[in-house]
Image (spheres, rainbow, N blue to C red):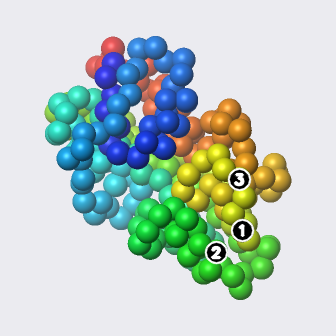
């Protein structure tokens, strides 16, 4: 099964490749260069569906939209769906803005959660299935670790005593919000009569 991802982010493609390593019947690929949908949804699920439909229109293939981000308790859930647009610049710039916005927030009040929503659409744009995943943690006081992207170096997991960026890929792929949503989606793909 050819499955086009509604993203041009190679980091997300790499994670899903790793998570689908044993799925010989699924060939993942990034959306084409002209993929650039306007994310007008008010939730992760709405934006995931927008991306999936846009990819399907461009490729006439089964397409998977994914939208994810981080919600911080002390910031009333921000940056949320605006995680990738929290400020201009790079992942480093967005992390540094987040740390600056939390500089007066003490250790016990830095709770946060990663959220992921996925939407699978048919080549004609029909929604087939949606899934979600959630991963709870805290925002650290500084970057730590090199494995990952986005907010991983500041997303601290108290039960493991590490940031996500300090985890090996195998551990991350067992626990992450994206892994949770993807495993649910794979279960649907393998049991769907339409896709088989």
- Residue to which mark 2 is pinned: 99
Please tell me which of labels 2 and 1 falls first in the chain: 2
Residue closer to the observer: 35 or 138: 35
Which residue shows up at 79% across the image and 74% down it? 107
From the top left corner, tell me how far across and down residue 121 is, in percent.
Answer: 28, 35
Q: Secondary structure at mark 1?
A: loop
**Rendered view: 31 above or below 153:** above
**Rendered view: 67 above or below 32:** below
> Which of labels 3 and 2 is toward the front?
3
**Rendered view: 148 above or below 64:** below
- Residue to which mark 3 is pinned: 145
Which residue shows up at 55% across the image and 29% down it? 18
Q: Secondary structure at mark 2?
A: helix
Marks 1 and 2: in contact by CB < 8 Å? yes
* Residue 184 shows in the view: no
Q: Is residue 67 left or right of residue 50?
A: right
- Residue to which mark 1 is pinned: 142
The Cα–Cα distance between marks 2 and 1, rounded to whole angstroms, is: 7 Å
From the top left corner, tell me how far across and down residue 49 is, in percent.
Answer: 31, 47
Q: Secondary structure at mark 3?
A: loop
* Residue 3 shows in the view: yes
Which residue shows up at 62% across the image and 80% down it? 100
Residue closer to the observer: 78 or 98: 98
Q: Residues within 10 Å of mark 3 (few under 14, many from 20)?
A: some
The Cα–Cα distance between marks 3 and 1, rounded to whole angstroms, is: 10 Å
Question: Dividing the image into 4 quarters, which one contains the C terminus?
Answer: top left
**Rendered view: 7 above or below 70:** above
């Amino acid at each position: 099964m050819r499955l086009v991802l509604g993203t041009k982010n190679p980091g997300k493609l790499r994670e899903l490749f790793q998570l689908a390593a044993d799925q010989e019947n699924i060939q993942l690929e990034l959306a084409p260069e002209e993929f650039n949908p306007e994310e007008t949804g008010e939730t992760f699920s709405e934006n995931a569906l927008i991306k999936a439909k846009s990819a399907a229109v461009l490729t006439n293939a089964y397409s998977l939209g994914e939208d994810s981000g981080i919600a911080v308790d002390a910031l009333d859930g921000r940056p949320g769906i605006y995680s990738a647009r929290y400020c201009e610049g790079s992942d480093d710039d967005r992390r540094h803005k987040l740390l600056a916005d939390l500089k007066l927030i003490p250790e016990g009040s830095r709770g946060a959660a990663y959220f992921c929503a996925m939407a699978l659409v048919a080549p004609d744009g029909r929604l087939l299935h949606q899934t979600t995943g959630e991963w709870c943690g805290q925002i650290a006081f500084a970057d730590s670790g090199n494995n990952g992207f986005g907010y991983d170096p500041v997303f601290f997991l108290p039960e493991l005593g590490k940031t996500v960026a300090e985890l090996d890929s195998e551990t991350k792929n067992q626990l992450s919000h994206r892994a949770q949503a993807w495993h649910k989606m794979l279960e649907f793909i393998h049991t769907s009569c339409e896709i088989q």
